[in-house]
Image (spheres, rainbow, N blue to C red):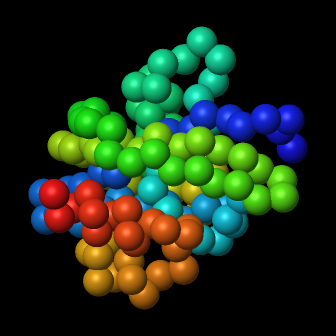
């Protein structure tokens, strides 16, 4: 458990069909739930470096960094994250689950609505993909 808030990043990656890349989390917080790839920013690392590192570690792909789309706070009894979500495009490679992910795939918004996701994910994706 951290003594204070930690900065994290998330990647909203879409493929040519407009589907969103999601991972199924393998560890707390939110183990078993689907969410966008991402994680903590390490000391001395830029936000962009953290995004690329986390995306590749969790999914095996690379993508082009786009704009900041959302700032989200996750707070529970054990964790406090300030999460900066960025749009990413032009994914390269075949997704494979790695590091914190137990599964990975591209999903339409209709499919995402049927999955057990992290809190607020569907609303963020709806706002992001409608703009």
Instruction: Give the quadrant of the C terminus.
Output: bottom left
Camera-side residue of 58 and 119? 119
Residue 119 in the image: above or below residue 63? below
Residue 82 in the image: above or below residue 123? above
Q: Is residue 64 left or right of residue 119?
A: left
Quarter assignment of residue 86: top left
- x, y percent for residue 13: 30, 51
Residue 47 in the image: above or below residue 54? above
Camera-side residue of 122 and 89? 122
Residue 43 in the image: above or below residue 88? above
Is residue 2 among the parts visible in the rendering? yes
Q: Is residue 43 left or right of residue 94?
A: right
Count of marks, rendered view: 0
Is residue 39 among the parts visible in the rendering? no
Tell me what residue is drawn at x 39 percent, y 83 percent: 113
Q: Extreme top residue here?
A: 44
- x, y percent for residue 109: 29, 76
């Amino acid at each position: 458990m951290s003594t204070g808030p930690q900065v994290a990043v998330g990647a909203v990656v879409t493929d040519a069909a407009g589907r969103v890349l999601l991972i199924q989390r393998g560890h707390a917080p939110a183990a078993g739930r689907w969410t966008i790839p991402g994680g903590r920013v390490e000391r001395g690392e830029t936000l962009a470096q953290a995004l690329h590192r986390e995306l590749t570690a969790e999914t095996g792909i690379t993508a082009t960094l786009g704009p900041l789309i959302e700032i989200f706070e996750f707070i529970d009894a054990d964790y406090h994250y300030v999460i900066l979500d960025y749009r990413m495009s032009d994914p390269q490679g075949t997704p494979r689950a790695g590091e914190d992910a137990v599964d990975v795939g591209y999903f339409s918004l209709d499919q995402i609505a049927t999955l057990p996701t992290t809190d607020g994910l569907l609303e963020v994706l709806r706002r992001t993909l409608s703009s």
